[in-house]
């Protein structure tokens, strides 16, 4: 069984989309299993439908308003890089309304439901392909994997949305008596889960460089500090996921092709810039082509 796994990574998901488009359209990879975490979960349904151009158009045209119904931060460009600061009015408004997070991402839920139609959902559900998204169950302290086979249209769209909710900046969802948040808080790269579900060949898109090439800029405010702390923790989770995945693959004779970003795309993946994301999609496509050509030269 061939599987496509896409890690979390916010706006950097545009790079993953470019990689996946090349693998599907040019190399004709026919995946039976699609697993995504956070931003990866936004891509996989459309990729499984072979609608790469559709998701490219959607993904590379989103902005902050497409995601946030209440954006808790402001973006200022200083000394050549983007810096976030607290939007005090929006944060206070959220707390007055009794919310547990700094911001809300209900616009993203609407975007998911408006771009993945019920007919497309039913087409996928009746196919042999399995679409699985990763969520973090904060109440039970576990990671859960939600398959399209187990839910109706509205429920699955909600699980996709939950997988992307980068708490505490985005919504915390109360569902089935539990609190749920971004799947990346538990599993950034669900390679091990792909192997458990029977994958023998895996293409894994990792929205991070293979080696660390940068030092983060000093935190200028509490939001900057929180994002740096979360990014540090998620980086560690990602590395552990990859190591565990490699170990599981070795024991099951599973082959894995890794597609890392060749350069640092951004140090703040909460910022959605249309121009940047169009460029990253193109970069991902080109990188996948070059990597494929290199692999063909190595093979006898």
Image: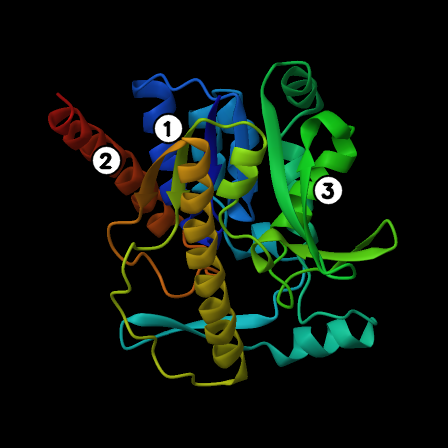
Q: Are marks 1 and 3 in contact (CB under 8 Å)?
A: no
Disc 2 to disc 3: CB gap under 8 Å: no
Residue sitting at x 44%, y 17%: 30
| CA distance separating discs 2 and 1 | 10 Å
Task: Tell me how far mark 1 sits from mark 3, CA to CA.
Answer: 25 Å
Measured along the vertical axis of the image, is residue 13 above or below residue 270?
above
Q: Quadrant of residue 53?
A: top left
Q: Which quadrant of the figure has residue 198?
A: top right
* Residue at x 35% of width, y 61% of height: 266
Mark 1 / mark 3, whichever is N-terminal? 1
Q: Which residue is mark 3?
A: 158
Position in image of residue 39 (x %, y %) = 52, 47
Horizontal side, residue 138 vs residue 188: left or right: right
Residue at image position (37%, 28%) is: 21
Is 117 or 163 nearer to us in this picture? 163
Q: The residue tagged with tag 2: helix, strand or loop?
A: helix
For mark 1, what is the residue? 21
Query: As rendered, which of 198 and 216 lies closer to the eye?
Result: 198
Q: Position of residue 58 (x, y in %)?
A: 49, 36
Q: Earlier in the sequence, mark 2 or mark 1?
A: 1
Is 192 left, or right, of 209 in this rendering? Answer: right
Q: Mark on residue 286? A: 2
For label 2, the crowd category at 10 Å Cα-Cα, with few meaning under 14, some 14 to 19 and many 20 or more, is: some
Q: In the displayed structure, would residue 270 be above or below residue 118?
A: below
Around disc 3, counting alpha carbons within 10 Å, would you say few (fewer than 14), some (14 to 19), or many (20 or more)? Answer: some
- Where is residue 256? Give x, y as percent: 37, 35
In this view, 53 is above or below 167: above
């Amino acid at each position: 069984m061939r599987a496509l796994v896409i890690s979390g990574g916010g706006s950097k998901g545009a790079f993953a989309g470019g990689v996946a488009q090349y693998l599907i359209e040019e190399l004709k990879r026919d995946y039976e299993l699609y697993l995504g975490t956070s931003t990866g979960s936004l891509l996989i349904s459309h990729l499984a439908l072979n609608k790469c151009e559709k998701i490219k158009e959607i993904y590379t045209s989103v902005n902050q308003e497409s995601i946030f119904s209440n954006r808790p931060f402001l973006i200022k460009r200083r000394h050549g890089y983007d810096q976030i600061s607290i939007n005090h009015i929006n944060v206070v408004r959220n707390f007055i309304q009794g919310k547990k997070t700094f911001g809300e991402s209900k616009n993203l839920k609407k975007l998911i439901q408006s771009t993945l139609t019920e007919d497309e959902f039913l087409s996928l559900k009746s196919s042999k392909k399995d679409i699985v998204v990763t969520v973090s169950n904060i109440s039970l302290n576990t990671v859960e994997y939600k398959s399209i086979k187990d839910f109706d249209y509205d429920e699955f769209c909600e699980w996709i949305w939950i997988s992307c909710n980068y708490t505490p900046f985005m919504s915390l969802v109360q569902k089935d008596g539990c609190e749920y948040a971004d799947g990346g808080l538990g599993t950034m790269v669900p390679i091990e889960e792909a192997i458990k579900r029977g994958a023998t060949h895996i293409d894994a898109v990792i929205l991070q460089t293979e080696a660390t090439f940068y030092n983060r800029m000093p935190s200028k405010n509490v939001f900057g500090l929180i994002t740096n702390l979360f990014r540090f923790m998620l980086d560690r989770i990602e590395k552990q996921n990859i190591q565990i995945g490699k170990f599981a693959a070795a024991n099951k004779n599973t082959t894995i092709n890794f597609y890392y970003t060749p350069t640092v795309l951004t140090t703040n993946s909460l910022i959605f810039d249309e121009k940047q994301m169009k460029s990253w999609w193109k970069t991902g496509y080109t990188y996948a082509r070059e990597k494929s050509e290199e692999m063909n030269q190595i093979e006898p």
